[in-house]
Amino acid sequence: AGMIALAACVLLPLRGGVRGEPDTFRPQLVMELVEGQSVEQALEAGEAPPAGFWDDVERVVAEANAAGFYHADLHEGNLMIRPDGSAAVIDWANAQEARNPVTRIMGRFVQGGSAESVVAAFRERHPESA
């Protein structure tokens, strides 16, 4: 089983610009098929996420936050356990982009807090995999 997930946000050229403007670069979302199962599926099957999984989730979310993006729907169904045990965070459809201090505060609110505090809540709910 697998799910489609955001792999990266990269700057890609927009050739020719608009109305004769020069070439520009715009952020583009890059998608990938993520093999594995969600944390929700693993827990329903009586399996716990592997050691180091929550550290991986925290790193992914912190990197997205540092790039100015905040996930608006973090829950066990949107956290994938890849076959190698690493984490993938999926369903960025409602992510918030933060371009200034006010929107960064709102992004943290929508995400449920900082990467560290969000993952601490997951660890508390699932001590068997902490």
Image: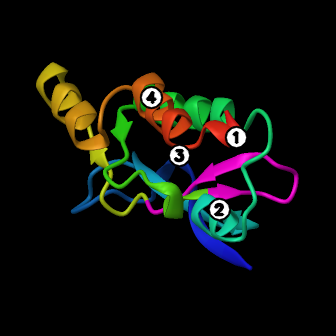
Does residue 89 belong to the magenta stretch? yes
Q: Earlier in the sequence, mark 1 or mark 3?
A: 3
Residue type of the residue flagged with mark 4: Ala
Does residue 51 belong to the magenta stretch? no
Crowd around label 1: few <14 · some 14–19 · many ≥20 (10 Å): some
Residue type of the residue flagged with mark 1: Ser
Furthest residue to the bottom? 1
Q: Earlier in the sequence, mark 2 or mark 3?
A: 3
Give the Cα separation between the discs numbered 1 and 3.
Answer: 32 Å
Give the Cα separation between the discs numbered 1 and 4.
Answer: 18 Å
Q: Which residue is mark 4?
A: 115
Q: Secondary structure at mark 4?
A: helix
Residue type of the residue flagged with mark 3: Val
Kindly tell me whether residue 98 is visible in this rendering.
no
Q: Earlier in the sequence, mark 2 or mark 4?
A: 2
Disc number for residue 129: 1
Crowd around label 4: few <14 · some 14–19 · many ≥20 (10 Å): many
Between residue 105 and residue 68, name the one nearer to us. 105
Q: Is residue 38 left or right of residue 108?
A: right
Residue sitting at x 74%, y 79%? 1
Q: Which residue is mark 3?
A: 10
**Residue 60 picture location, percent across and down:** 58, 36
Looking at the rendering, the stretch of residues picked out in magenta corresponds to 80-91
Q: Secondary structure at mark 1?
A: helix
Q: Earlier in the sequence, mark 1 or mark 4?
A: 4
Residue sitting at x 16%, y 34%? 106
Residue type of the residue flagged with mark 2: Leu
